[in-house]
Image: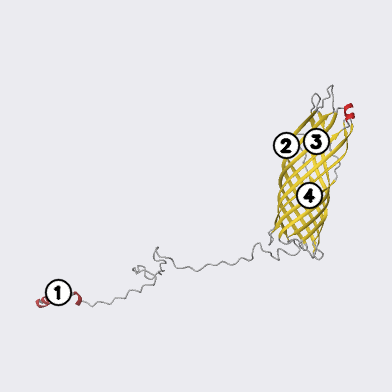
Amino acid sequence: MASLFRLLVVLAVWGALAPCGSAQAQTPTAAPPAAIPGTSAEPDILPGFPRPPDAPRSLLQAPPAAAAYFCDALPGPYFERDPRLDPPPLPPPGWFADLDIGIVAAHVKNRLTELVTLPGRTPDTVHIGSAELNWAASPRFEVGRRLPSGFGEFSIAYRFFSTEGSGLSPAPDGLAALKSRLDVNVGDLDYSSRELSLLPHWGMKWRFGIRAVGAFFDSRSAEPVAVATAGSGVFERQTSNNFWGFGPHMGLELARRWEESGLAFVGRVDGATILGRLEQHFFEETTPIGPTGEVLAAGTNDRASQDVPMLTWSLGLSWQPPGWPDAQLFFGYEYEYWWNVGRNSNTTARGELSDQGILLRAEFNF
């Protein structure tokens, strides 16, 4: 028993003094995984998870070149003539000019009324009316640019006419010679567009823009001097109305075409509302009266703001010569009416204007 104990003690001492390397053979370890290209050599703390490459690995490095980006081409060029949007029956794109000649008969509803006080006399009511006006030529000039691909057109136009007339009118002492005048000026700045989506052989054109107008009319009544001296003493009376203003207007045109002949039945309507100022003048003058033979005269002036609606419509035939597609002719009837052109809301003065007649139009494209 004692010998066994001594043997165990010797083995324990020998194991403690033996080299560590000889106690147990080293087990070979697995080789570290190969580094993924583009990644750092840092230890993989999450083995088995994907590790995308850093691009760029440093903010100081340039990023890799990206592929060039190309967008698809537009379906078609803009502001280029398109046979689908610019068909042969319609006027071609480019510059154009219109010349209208209207042979019109104008009429003025002159209800201008106001009190005029002559020195030393009681106030007189001045109301004359208007004489029948003569026929007049009413030219209209238009110049514009028509854009291709159905983008419409821009234009500027100016129209005017002037006429006068004479006759007889009732006066305090009998009949008096009456003379009336009328001057009209209209300017338009418009954008227009044509539509081809109506029924077959039908076309539509609408426009809108700004209109500036000026309208002046007056009347002068004069009695024979002998008759006036023996009666009221008032020899001459005169009234006048001057309106000017501007405002929006819109128009619509419908046309039924016969392509084979170049003819078309055309109807147009145009409406405007003009905001402006009117000035009215009323005047009286007497024959020489009194012991010294003095002549007495007096007048009254009124001013006010007024809104003047306008309506114009026409019907007729247009013709586009088959051998000359850059020209178009129109022949028809036109009617125009102005409301409130002589209306003063502060007094009882009223006035309206109308004109109608034959219209000839020639359009040329360049």
Amino acid at the residue labelled 3: Thr
- Under mark 4, the amino acid is Thr
Contact flag, marks 4 and 2 (Cβ < 8 Å): no
Quadrant in the rendering for residue 23: bottom left
Q: How crowded is mark 4: few (under 14 residues within 10 Å), some or many (20 or more)?
A: some
- Measure how far apart labels 2 and 3 are at the Cα level: 16 Å
**Cα distance in 3D space between marks 4 and 1:** 128 Å
Q: Which residue lies furthest to the front in this view?
A: 292
Q: In the image, is residue 169 above or below residue 199?
A: above
Of mark 4 and mark 1, the one earlier in the sequence is 1
Q: What residue is shown with label 2?
A: 304
> Residue 101: x, y in percent?
81, 52
- Disc 1 target residue: 17
State the residue position of label 3: 239
Location of the N terminus (image quadrant): bottom left
Q: Are marks 2 and 3 in contact (CB under 8 Å)?
A: no
Question: Which of the two labelled residues, at mark 2 and mark 3, occupies the earlier sequence position?
Answer: 3
Q: Which amino acid does label 2 sit on?
A: Ala
Q: Is residue 279 above or below residue 105?
A: above
Q: Is residue 208 left or right of residue 136?
A: left
| Residue 285 image offset from top left, x and y in percent | 82, 30
Mark found first going from the N terminus, 4 or 2: 2
Q: For marks 4 and 3, give the one nearer the viewer.
A: 3
What is the number of the mark on residue 312? 4
Locate residue 144, reporting x and y percent.
71, 55
Mark 1 vs 2: CB contact within 8 A: no
- Residue drawn at point x = 36 percent, y = 70 percent: 47
- Secondary structure type for disc 1: helix
